[in-house]
Amino acid sequence: MTTEFVSNEQIVQAARRNLNQGAWDYLVGGSESETTLRRNRLAFDRIAFRPRVLVDVSNLDTSTTFLGHKMRIPVMLAPIGSLQLFHPEGGAASTRAAAEFGTMHVVSTVTEPSLEDIAAAADNPKVFQLYVRGDWGWVEEIVARVKEAGYMGFCVTVDLAHYSRRERPMLNAWQPPTRRNPRDPSYQAALTWESMDRMREMVGMPFMIKGIATAEDAALAVEHGVDVIWVSNHGGRQLDHGLGTLDMLSEIVDAVDGKADIILDGGIQRGSDVVKALALGAKAVAIGKLQGWGLAAAGQEGVLRVLELLEDELISAMGLLGVTSIDQLGSAYIRRAEVVTQPHEMSAWVNMPGDRIL
């Protein structure tokens, strides 16, 4: 019974028992020294709360609306390639969990089953995420399939101009399916802002760019009519020695100035992390590793339990902060603080040593 999981720590441990070393390294690792990965977690650890008391918090509302769709909590499922590595049902299991819980799923180009099968698996709102692996004819074909399948948004990942050195799986001579039979990467490397303009006009639905890491690019995204700016460093899996995503957020919020919605991913492991991101200006967050761990632990039910536990933590944090709805969160409830633990990919849980020794 997945309800026996009382913490996402237990879900991570169950996932480790179920995964071979290659799939585990692919899920938890970052690029090169994994400095960016650890900074993602460190950025959250540097933020402390400023709670208010004697506020009536007997009724809390954790829901939000994103692109016209209500979400039970401001947490969506991030696009992850090769979800089938973690469970045979792959993206279909994740999207059914999102539908049962009441949130969105952003579906990766490079996961299984097909984008049509994932769309048909449940009726929750879905966004399609694109890696460009062909010419404009190839892109047009993908866009037509996405529209026909009923996706409500379109997301282009832009921080994968070159594939990084992800050394954990490399050291074990292991590669994900997308690297065993790679398509021509030059198309992704050739993307420009003009490419985004052409694609945005082609898709005719809410348009997101994932992989924004600076105020300069956020401002350009707004100029180019992007609807949603996704603050991301690919979970620390692309450029090493980057900032944590939460450390990037404030300058990007200032640059966007309310002209687009903002999503953030990278390092989110608890409901309190969601609160911190929203207090600093994100509209919603997305979970990648947590989704993969839930899927590996118990398939659809594991992902559902991950979301339920995040919700429980979110309710606790909101109530103890003295807020009753998501829109009340702001910078008055947080401040910078000293770090008390060394960050790693599982350091939000006190009993987790991190790294491959699990």
Image (tube, rainbow, N blue to C red):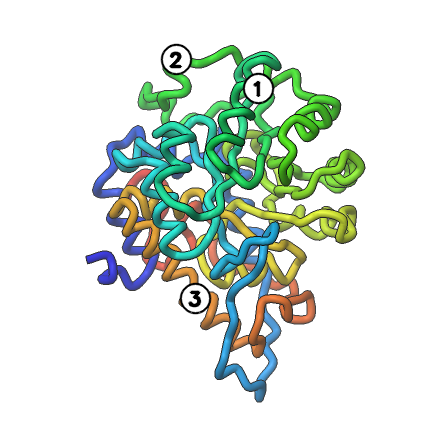
Q: Is residue 98 above or below residue 48?
A: above
Estimate the spatial distance between the alpha carbons at disc 2 and disc 1, rounded to whole Å. 19 Å
Residue type marked 3: Glu
Q: In this view of the protein, which residue sits in the foreground, 48 or 79?
A: 79
Q: In this view of the protein, which residue sits in the foreground, 199 or 39?
A: 199
**Pair 1/3: label in front:** 1
Q: Which residue is mark 3?
A: 313
Q: State the quadrant of the C terminus.
A: top left
Where residue 139 appears, as percent x and y from the top left, is 57, 19
Q: Is residue 15 visible?
A: no
Estimate the spatial distance between the alpha carbons at disc 1 and disc 3, rounded to whole Å. 40 Å
Q: What secondary structure is marked by label 1?
A: helix
Q: Which residue is mark 2?
A: 181
Q: Looking at the image, which residue is at 50% across and 33% down? A: 237
Q: State the quadrant of the N terminus.
A: bottom left
Q: Residue furthest front?
A: 148
Where residue 347 appears, as percent x and y from the top left, is 42, 53
Q: Which residue is mark 1?
A: 139
Where residue 268 appears, as percent x and y from the top left, is 49, 51
Q: Residues within 10 Å of mark 1 (few under 14, many from 20)?
A: some
Q: Earlier in the sequence, mark 3 or mark 2?
A: 2
Where residue 33 appears, as percent x and y from the top left, is 49, 32
Residue type marked 2: Asn
Q: What secondary structure is marked by label 3?
A: helix
Q: Is residue 128 visible?
A: yes
